[in-house]
Structures are given as C-alpha cells and as structure tokens.
Image (cartoon, rainbow, N blue to C red):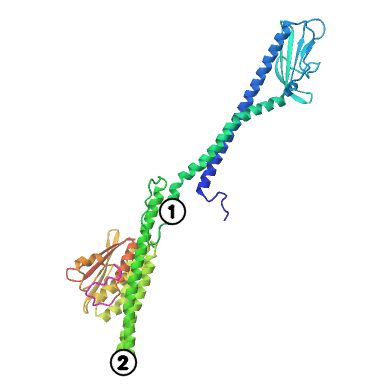
C-alpha cells in the first residue's frame, strides 16, 4: 500500500494546509500588489517625463534665439539614463538643436508624434515622450531607459511587499500556536484514554469538550461501558466456572481414593460408578461452558428461513431415550410445517436445553409438552414440564449463570437456561418463564415468522 505524503500529525496537517492556503492567497495578493506598484510607478515616471518636457519648453520659449546649450556635466549615475532635447522648428532650413542633456546625441531622438512611445535605440529599450508648442515653434523630446524605469519600479514594489512578507511570517508563527491551542482538547482526550486500564474503565469527563469531539467521547464512553460489562461478566464467568469445576474434581478424586481403598470388588465398583457420574457431570459442564463461551463471542447471526417443526421433531426423537429412561412422557404438538427466521444450529441448541431441562426436573411419571403455535407474524415455541416449578420471586433470575434453585433433585450445572437466554437475545426473540397453575414450569419463546 502506498503511504500518504501527508504527515501523520493532525497538528502538522492543519498547519501545512492552512499555510498552503495562506501562501496561495498571499502569492496572489503579492502578484496583484506588484502589478499595481509597477503600474503606478510607470504612471509616475510618465507624468515626470511630461512635466519635464513642459518645463524645458517653458525655458526655451523665454529665449528662442539663445545660443545652443548643452549640459555636459553628470552629477548622478542615473543622469545618463534620462536624455532630452529641445529643438527650434521656426526659421528657414532644418530645425536646430536648442538644448540637450548630457549624453544626448546631436541627431533627433527616435521620438514618435507628440505623446508617449517606445523604441529600441543604441542597443537599449527606451520610453519616449515628445511635445511641441506650435506657438513658439519649440519641440521637446525626452527618452528614459526602460532598465532604470524597471529597476525603480521594482524597488517601489519591493518596498510595498515587505510589510506583507513580514506579516506573513508573523501570521505563520501565530497560526502554528493557534492550531496547537485549538487541538489541546484532542491531546487531553488522548491522555484521558491512555489513563484508562482494564480495571478502570470509568466514563470520560472532559471540561469544555468541543462540539466535534462530543460524538467521539460519547462513543468511547459507550465502548468503555460495554468492555467493562464484558470484563466483569468474564471475571464472574471464570470465577463461577472454577468453582463449579472444583466440585466434580474433588468428588472424582474422593471416589478414586475410595476405589483404591475399597476392601472388596463390590465397594470398588460402587466407587467407580460414582467416579463415572462425576466424570459425566464434569464433561457436561465443560460442554456447556464451551457452548456459552462461543455464544458470548457470537455476533448477531445471519437469520434464515428454518423449519421449526422439522427441527423439533428431530430433537424430540434424539431425546426420547433420555425421557424414557427418566420415566417421563415427551410429546410434540406442531403444524406440519412452521418456517421461522432463525439460525438453525443455535435454535437447535436452545430447544435442546429447554427440553432437556424439562425432562430433568419432571418426576417419574411426569410429562413434558413441546408446542409450536403460529400467532400472526410470530411463532411461539412452548415447553412445559410437570416438575416443582420455581418460586415466584426467583422467576426473574432464571438464566443467570450457574444458578441452581432449590430443590436440586435433578443433576445439572446451571448453564442451560443461560445458554437459552443468550441465544434468545441474539435472535431478538421474546423469552418468558412462568409457573403452570397445575404445577411445573412453562417457557415461551417468541420467534419471527418466516
């Protein structure tokens, strides 16, 4: 992947971006200012040429018959850059030169008709001005070297641009300071986030939070809240799992020791049977823990059209031997087909846990009923047992991890309903626990109809 030419620092990016805009705008302003300065200087020099021509004509008109006058002494380096001639046009014969400047030729300068013009003469470019006084018969011609005009105009423009350049430097320094101050809340936010640890995920509270950072702070606080809840949940899960695993492991160890010390084969077999029961309980606990761990990391599943009737028929067929061994009647009431919006594997895990739980808590000779009913746009899955039910004040706690309510006549690890509640949450399905009037627990799961 090609790396960006921009710096990674937001402060540097803002500073460079604004400076680039400033330089572009300042460059445009400088060009306009330069052009205006040069134009004004040219206007000023042209005005000076006209004023000097009129002055020379005034001097020559006062003594039209005076002898020729030539300024032969240069007192300034620019004097050779400005040439002038005054010609007397009256009389018989050709015009004669009345006055000329130092360095001016005896021949007439290549002036145009009266007014301004430009000409190439003596290897240089000149700006010329000519003016004729018809009454006195005097004509003044002035020539100014374009080089000196350009040099002086550039000097004027340079002096005009110096304050702009100095102001730009000061503005750039001020801009860097202002951008850094403006990004101070971002640095405070960074420090506040950096100070958070997995054990300290309190909400961020920044004074005078800019409006642009408010959504970021709100999103971070929501993230911290979710992460904190997840971490607390995982800590409780780990602690409860360790506690629940400790019991069957201790029982297994005790039964192994009892088998080792058994005086006869019958006592040894009894101890080994209890070892097998402890191993089965521990295996079931580990399987439930792994299932719950996978569900905790599960995002919202991709829901598909799933035939709930076919799924329940297969489950009931699988659990029928378990119900038969427990002396419990298992029956299913469902329409021939009942498509729902669900993830098939997760729905199968949910229904298996509900039916298995109902079989475990039903007494011998009891009955477990599984029903599937269509209600408008929803499908209701119901599981009822004939067990002891649950105390009304404890119904709301069903689904907590490792919760086993007294009496505990049925074997289990207290994770089945936790798995059911998690899968229901992933499906955004309604889940309700209630006691049957004739005894036993009733579970209703409301799913979206396909």
Please, what is the dominant secondary structure of the magenta stretch?
loop
Q: Which residues are magenta?
A: 400-411
- Residue tagged by mark 1? 191
Q: Residue furthest right?
A: 93
Q: Nearer the viewer, residue 71 or 39?
A: 71
User: Which mark sits nearer the N-terminus, 2 or 1?
Assistant: 1
The image position of residue 1, as x and y in percent, is: 57, 56
The image shows residue 214, relative to residue 299, as above or below, that is above
Badge nearest the viewer, 2 or 1: 1
Q: Quadrant of residue 57?
A: top right
Q: Quadrant of residue 295?
A: bottom left
Quadrant (top left, top right, bottom left, bottom right) of the C terminus? bottom left
- Residue tagged by mark 2? 262
Whether 401 is among the magenta residues is yes
Q: Quadrant of residue 195?
A: bottom left
The image position of residue 312, as x and y in percent, is: 31, 70
Gap in angstroms between the C-alphas marked 2 and 1: 66 Å
Residue 361 can be seen, yes or no: yes
Whether 299 is among the magenta residues is no
Residues packed near mark 1 inside 10 Å, few (<14), some (14 to 19) or many (20 plus): few
Q: Nearer the viewer, residue 304 or 198?
A: 198
**What secondary structure is found at the residue carrying circle 1?**
helix
């Amino acid at each position: 992947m090609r790396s960006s030419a921009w710096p990674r620092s937001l402060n540097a990016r803002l500073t460079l971006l604004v400076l680039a805009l400033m330089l572009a705008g300042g460059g445009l302003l400088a060009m306009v200012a330069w052009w205006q300065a040069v134009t004004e200087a040219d206007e000023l020099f042209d005005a000076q040429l006209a004023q000097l021509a009129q002055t020379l004509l005034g001097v020559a008109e006062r003594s039209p018959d005076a002898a020729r006058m030539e300024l032969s002494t240069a007192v300034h380096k620019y004097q050779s850059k400005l040439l002038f001639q005054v010609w007397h046009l009256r009389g018989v014969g050709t015009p004669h030169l009345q006055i000329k400047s130092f360095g001016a030729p005896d021949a007439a300068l290549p002036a145009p008709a009266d007014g301004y013009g430009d000409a190439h003469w003596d290897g240089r470019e000149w700006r010329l001005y000519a003016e004729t006084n018809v009454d006195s018969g005097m004509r003044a011609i002035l020539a100014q070297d374009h080089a000196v005009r350009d040099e002086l105009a550039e000097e004027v423009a340079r002096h005009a641009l110096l304050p702009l350049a100095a102001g730009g430097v000061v503005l750039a320094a001020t801009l860097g300071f202002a951008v850094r101050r403006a990004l101070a809340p971002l640095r405070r936010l960074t420090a506040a986030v950096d100070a958070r640890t997995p054990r300290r995920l309190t909400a961020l509270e920044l004074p005078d939070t800019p409006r642009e950072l408010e959504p970021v702070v709100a999103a971070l606080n929501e993230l911290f809240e979710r992460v904190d809840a997840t971490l607390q949940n995982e800590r409780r899960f780990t602690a409860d799992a360790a506690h629940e695993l400790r019991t069957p492991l201790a029982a297994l160890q005790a039964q192994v020791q009892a088998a080792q010390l058994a005086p006869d084969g019958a006592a040894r077999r009894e101890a080994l049977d209890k070892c097998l029961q402890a191993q089965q309980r521990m295996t079931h606990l580990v399987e439930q823990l792994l299932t719950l761990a996978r569900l905790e990391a599960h995002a919202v599943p991709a829901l598909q059209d799933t035939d709930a009737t076919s799924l329940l028929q297969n489950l009931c067929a699988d659990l029928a031997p378990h119900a038969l061994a427990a002396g419990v009647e298992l029956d299913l009431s469902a329409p021939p087909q009942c498509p729902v919006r669900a993830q098939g594997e997760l729905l199968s895990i949910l229904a298996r846990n509900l039916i298995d739980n109902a079989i475990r808590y039903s007494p011998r000779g009891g009955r477990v009923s599984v029903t599937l009913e269509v209600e408008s746009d929803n499908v209701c899955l119901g599981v009822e047992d004939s067990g002891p039910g649950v105390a009304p004040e404890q119904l709301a706690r069903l689904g907590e991890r490792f919760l086993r309510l007294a009496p505990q006549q049925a074997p289990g690890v207290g994770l089945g309903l936790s798995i059911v509640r998690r899968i229901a949450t992933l499906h955004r399905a309604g889940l309700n626990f209630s006691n049957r009037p004739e005894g036993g627990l009733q579970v209703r799961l409301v799913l979206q109809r396909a």
